[in-house]
């Protein structure tokens, strides 16, 4: 590693490039056997280009960083709580067993974190806790109950939406019937005259 890099003068060129250079010796001024070349001080170039790096210090520093990272690991999840990632896995398993998800589908942990963050300001927040140096912890029974209630609310919204659409369609049908009856009444009145 402490050796200098190859300079252009040290590189070998393929024979075909040499032949081309030999053919052009007389064509380009300053080339050929009689051309004078400026001397290059290779020792100065080597000092400028190559820096020696002491690798013996780099490895122990990296090893120290790895031990520091291990020391910064998260504390374990306290008893009675579950992490959002573990809840997502258990929820996926439960929904597959119930037939509400296909075997190759899953609830991603990001979805659970999103419900924790975004539902906190809403009407039905997903209860989360901070305990033992951890945040966003869930109680498994509460989280499953929240999920079931969320699904019920979603079903209720779908039913209400369909009922509203049916009412609107029925209202439109009544108006349409009234219009045809009123048009038909005018036609009959003109026939009588």
Image: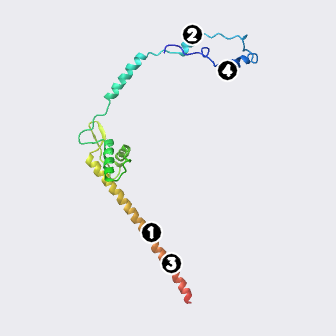
* Mark 2 or mark 3, earlier in chain: 2
Q: Nearer the viewer, mark 2 or mark 4?
A: 4
Distance of label 2 from label 3 (alpha carbons): 103 Å
Residue at the spot of label 4: 16
- From the top left corner, tell me how far across and down residue 76 is, in percent: 27, 35
**Which sits in the foreground, 189 or 65?**
65
Q: Is residue 178 above or below residue 100?
A: below
Q: Residues within 10 Å of mark 4 (few under 14, many from 20)?
A: few
Q: Percent from the top left, x then y, of residue 65?
A: 36, 24
On the picture, is 69 further left or further right than 42? left
Is the residue marked by circle 2 packed among few (<14), some (14-19), or many (20+) residues within 10 Å?
few
Percent across and percent down for residue 105 are: 38, 48
Q: Which residue is outermost to the front? A: 15
* Labels 4 & 3 near each other (Cβ < 8 A): no
Q: Residue at x 34, y 55 (%)?
A: 151
Question: Is label 2 or label 3 in front?
Answer: 2
Q: Residue furthest left?
A: 79
Disc 2 target residue: 43
SS at mark 3 in the image: helix
Residue 57, picture quadrant: top left
Q: Along the polypeptide, which appears first: circle 4 or circle 3?
A: 4
Residue that numbered label 3 is attached to: 180
Residue 169's disc is: 1
């Amino acid at each position: 590693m402490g050796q200098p890099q190859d300079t252009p003068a040290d590189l070998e060129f393929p024979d075909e490039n040499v032949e081309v250079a030999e053919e052009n010796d007389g064509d380009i001024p300053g080339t050929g056997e009689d051309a004078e070349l400026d001397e290059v001080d290779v020792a100065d170039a080597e000092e400028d280009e190559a820096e020696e790096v002491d690798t013996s210090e780099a490895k122990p520093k990296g090893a120290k960083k790895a031990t520091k990272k291990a020391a910064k690991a998260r504390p374990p999840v306290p008893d009675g709580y579950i992490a959002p990632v573990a809840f997502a896995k258990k929820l996926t398993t439960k929904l597959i067993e119930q037939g509400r998800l296909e075997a190759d589908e899953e609830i991603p942990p990001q979805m659970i974190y999103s419900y924790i963050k975004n539902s906190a300001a809403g009407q039905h927040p997903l209860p989360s806790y901070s305990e033992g140096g951890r945040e966003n912890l869930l109680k498994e029974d509460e989280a499953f109950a929240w999920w079931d209630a969320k699904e019920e609310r979603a079903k209720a919204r779908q039913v209400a939406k369909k009922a509203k659409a049916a009412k609107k369609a029925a209202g439109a049908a009544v108006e349409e019937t009234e219009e045809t009856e009123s048009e038909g009444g005018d036609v009959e009145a003109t026939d009588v005259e």
